[in-house]
Image (tube, grey):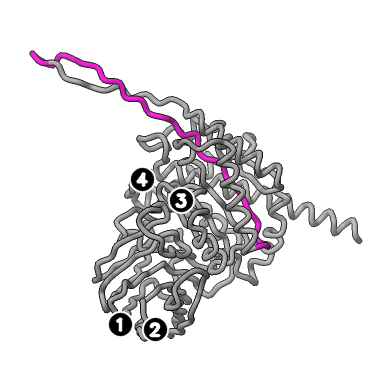
Amino acid sequence: MNISSWNTSKKVIISLFTGVLTTISSMAVGQNNGIAQDTALYRFFAALRKSDSNVISVLHLGDSHIQAGFFPFTTAFFLQQDFGSAGRGWVFPYNLANTNGPSDYRWNSTSRWDADRIIDRNKSTDVLGPGAIVLTSRNDAPTLAFNGRQDDERMDNNVRQAELFYDPGTDDSTISVPGAGVDISTAPFEGGATTLRKASLTFAAPVQTFQVRWDRQNAQPFRFYGALLQNGENGILYSAVGINGAMYQHYNENNSTLIAEMEVMQPQLVIISLGTNEAYGSLSASAFREQIDEAVKMIRRYQPKASIVLTTPPECKRVSKRPYRRKVGKKYKTYYRTAYYPNPYIAVVTQQIMSYCRENGIACWNFNGVNKAMAKNFASGWSGDHIHFNARGYQLQGKLLYEALRNSYDKFLKVEKTHKNQAE
């Protein structure tokens, strides 16, 4: 599934954040916008309480609902308002891969690039890295330039430290980054070639843009996996990784991506928003449940202290277009009536996610239930396919996830206070 890019003006977005989102999402308070089994998050909440003196890493994993950026972007914005911002987190040159991505930054390059994604299972067996997507170039001197939007007050694009992940295909490549100190290390994550590298950049003062050039003499492809950006401050470091069309199966079959995410991002909280694509396929309920279990076990194996939240998908619809003919002048023309009807497999996917979480003590945010309870509020938030949301819909979803997490965190604080009082 692909998702359209929305060009929304800053004025409209800021208005949504400061006005409409606050008003509408507050209606969810009485509509059970909570997280089930939220005691499973108490370890994360204990770390969150000390966010003023630590960097708290969050990974939001998913499909096209995540790749566009609006949903995780909004959750990150509100969490960072409460607990501080440690920087932009994971970024990737989606525009150079000819696909959609977050709108608050852009990459430029003088080189030609090809892309390989985790859903392209028959295309490549290469390691795809933490972002589930990799850029490849044959250029002997590939270049990349990161440009964070400086007019966007909602996301922190100030960079003091950056980690770039790449494979030059040779041991004797060089890298230059004007204005930055550069330290090169090997084997930043499991499964890559011996030439896989991490370049750790340090800037003397915060920057919103930087340029990178590699020089090498090698016929092997050059691969770029993405970057992890920090601002040098404590707080929330919120990374989002989403690939259009992705399912649990894709992350499991190319599990080097899950492993790389755990090793590179070291998340203390992993939010997984998958299941929509499974609901439009032929996967059985039992097979879907097994896919969930495999992904969860992989995360727990490589990041055993991470808390996990699974979210259920939106109340997506199926589309029916029925032709009819109408006489126009002396000729008849064919027109189509479009109707939307429920996708019954969304309910199956939702039920399996919720029951798996309940039986395994994993936190679960039933967004499907919230989405249905707030159908009127989301009515203008759907895109034309009624599978994805538009910018407004995703921003509302992101605010609701933040509120659910915040409600559980506040409950955690009350429990901690009660235990402390009882102990005194």
- What residue lies at 83% left-to-right and 53% top-to-bottom? 418
Give residue 215's mark: 1
Q: Which comes sooner in the sequence, label 1 or label 4?
A: 4
Q: Is residue 319 magenta?
A: yes
The percent coordinates of residue 190 (x first, y second) are 52, 70
Disc 3 from disc 1: Cα separation: 34 Å
Report helix, strand or loop for mark 3: helix
Give residue 66's mark: 3
Crowding at label 2, few (<14), some or many (≥20) Cα neighbours within 10 Å? Answer: few
Give residue 171's mark: 2
- What residue lies at 48% left-to-right and 63% top-to-bottom? 130
- What residue lies at 49% left-to-right and 51% top-to-bottom? 62
* Residue 85 relative to residue 220: left or right: right
* Tag 4 residue: 2
Of the two numbered discs 4 and 2 in the rendering, the one whose residue sits closer to the viewer: 2
**Does residue 216 sit above or below 392 in this rendering?**
below
Give residue 402's mark: none
Of residues 94 and 421, the one drawn nearer to the viewer in this rendering: 94
The percent coordinates of residue 316 (x first, y second) are 46, 34
The percent coordinates of residue 12 (x first, y second) are 38, 48
Q: Considering the image in quadrants, where does the N terminus appear?
A: top left
Q: Which comes sooner in the sequence, label 2 or label 1?
A: 2
Q: Which comes sooner in the sequence, label 4 or label 2?
A: 4
Of residues 262 and 234, the one drawn nearer to the viewer in this rendering: 262
Cβ–Cβ under 8 Å for marks 4 and 2 = no
Report the span colored magenta. Answer: 304-331
